[in-house]
């Protein structure tokens, strides 16, 4: 045995990490250590977990040459400032939802969800094949960020209502926790939208400061206990038909990465993207089953609410397109894509689902 190889082997026995296998593509590459700011608390384990999966996979693929340390929302920067932190280089990368940043430009919503927009599958089709990544990167480039699809919750629930909602008129004055564009549309329908962080929702709903609250879906909602104080569980969350989470990387840091590291990063993002939806599709049905056993009442939003909301949503997009060139550019392509997707999805997909779910 060569003396150096022997010493390395002995070192491994003493707990020195000399035995890690480093694939050739990374053996001579730099040791990269990044910090990732997540927008989410660890308690939202499915969403937060996507960043940990990214980190774990990169460590394994590169034999430890590319390491990313994940920080929960608020640890390094507040959850809603992940974009600024990546843009300024405070952190190298982040995991967040682009619709948090509609205050900078409403077009960021297309990287996540707009009301009556794409389902999770359609969002992936748009991103990977329909020009979504290309169009969104034109916008993100102005913010020194390269973004990657990084998870999806699937269609969310419409939320928890203390009283039954029978028609559009019942929304008048209704105080509902619903942030973002969904909240703006609710306001147009007469409701009073509120923006509250997760931990503040339950006490407000309990003391009647809120009449209703939306969060995510059965698995995450169950943990916050809304079913104990508001029995009417509405669907669908028409403002989040397939919201995508995204990984953000600072443009300069991305450019510095060797090609093999970039490929590894992109691959790990794609896995995190698939994994989150699969995990929700596994956890939500079981959580819904538990909730139903506790007397939760499932209710569909009345048709007049759905129709008025859709009308208000597309009126808002037309208004925004008239005054925001970046929005108009993305919206035009996105809308054509969406309409063509719907023409197809209502044929085989919808008829199969309808037969399977509703016929006996
Ligand atoms: Ca939601």
Image (tube, helix red, strand yellow):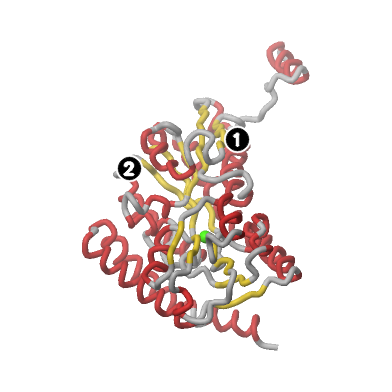
Please tell me which residue lies in front, 89 or 340: 89
Front in this rendered view, residue 295 or 4: 295
Q: Position of residue 186 (x, y in %)?
A: 42, 68
Query: How many C-alpha atoms fall within 10 Å of the one at disc 1: few (<14), some, or many (≥20)?
Result: some
Label 2 or label 1, whichever lies nearer to me, is 2
Q: Using residue 38 as the reference point, say whether residue 12 is left or right of it.
A: right
Quadrant for the N terminus, please. top right
Label drawn at residue 49: none
Q: In the image, residue 236 lies at what x, y percent?
A: 54, 72
Q: Is residue 264 visible?
A: no
From this view, report whether residue 318 is shown above or below residue 46.
below
Using the image, determine if residue 29 lies above or below residue 153: above
Disc 2 packing (10 Å; few <14; some 14–19; many ≥20): some
| Disc 1, SS | helix
Choose top left, top right, bottom left or bottom right for residue 53: top right
Q: Which picture quadrant has residue 157?
A: bottom right
Q: Residue at x 49, y 67 (%)?
A: 241
Q: Is the residue indicated by label 2 positioned so its CB lies within 8 Å of ligand 1?
A: no
Outermost residue, bottom side: 360
Left or right: 28 as drawn, with respect to 131: right
Considering depth in this image, is 260 or 285 the residue closer to the camera?
285
- Helix, strand or loop at mark 2: loop
Cα–Cα span, label 2 and label 1:
28 Å
Residue at the image position 41 percent from the left and 33 percent from the top: 253
Question: Which residue shows up at 22% across the image and 65% down it?
Answer: 322
**Residue 125 appears at what percent x and percent y?**
46, 64
Does residue 260 appear left or right of residue 8 in this picture?
left
Give the label on residue 143, or none.
2
Mark 1 near ligand 1 (CB under 8 Å)?
A: no
Horizontal and vertical percent position of residue 42: 62, 44
- Which residue bears the numbered disc 1? 59
Quarter of the figure with the C terminus: bottom right
């Amino acid at each position: 045995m060569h003396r150096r190889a022997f010493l390395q082997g002995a070192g491994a026995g003493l707990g020195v990490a000399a035995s890690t296998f480093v694939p050739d593509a990374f053996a001579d590459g730099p040791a990269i250590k990044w910090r990732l700011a997540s927008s989410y608390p660890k308690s939202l384990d499915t969403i937060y977990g996507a960043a940990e999966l990214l980190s774990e996979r990169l460590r394994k693929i590169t034999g430890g040459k590319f390491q990313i340390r994940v920080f929960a929302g608020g640890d390094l920067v507040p959850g809603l400032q992940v974009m600024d932190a990546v843009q300024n280089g405070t952190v190298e990368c982040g995991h967040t939802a682009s619709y948090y940043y509609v205050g900078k430009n409403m077009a960021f919503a297309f990287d996540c969800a707009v009301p009556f927009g794409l389902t999770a599958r359609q969002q992936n089709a748009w991103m990977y094949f329909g020009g979504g990544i290309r169009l969104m990167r034109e916008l993100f480039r102005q913010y020194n960020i390269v973004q990657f699809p990084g998870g999806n919750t699937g269609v969310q629930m419409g939320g928890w209502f203390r009283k039954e909602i029978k028609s559009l008129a019942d929304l008048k004055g209704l105080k509902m926790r619903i942030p973002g564009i969904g909240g703006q549309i609710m306001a147009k329908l007469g409701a009073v939208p509120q923006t509250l962080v997760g931990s503040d929702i339950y006490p407000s709903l309990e003391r009647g400061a809120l009449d209703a609250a939306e969060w995510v879906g059965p698995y995450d909602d169950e943990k916050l206990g809304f079913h104990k104080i508001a029995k009417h569980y509405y669907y669908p969350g028409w403002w989040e038909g397939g919201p995508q989470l995204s990984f953000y990387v600072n443009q300069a840091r991305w450019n510095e990465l060797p090609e093999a590291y970039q490929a590894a990063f992109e691959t790990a993002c794609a896995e995190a993207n698939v994994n989150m939806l699969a995990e929700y599709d596994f956890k939500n049905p079981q959580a819904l089953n538990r909730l139903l056993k506790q007397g939760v009442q499932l209710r569909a939003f009345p048709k007049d609410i759905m129709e008025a909301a859709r009308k208000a949503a597309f009126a808002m997009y037309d208004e925004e397109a008239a005054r925001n060139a970046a929005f108009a550019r993305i919206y035009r392509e996105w809308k054509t894509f969406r309409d063509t997707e719907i023409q197809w999805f209502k044929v085989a997909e919808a008829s199969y689902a309808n037969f399977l779910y509703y016929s006996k």
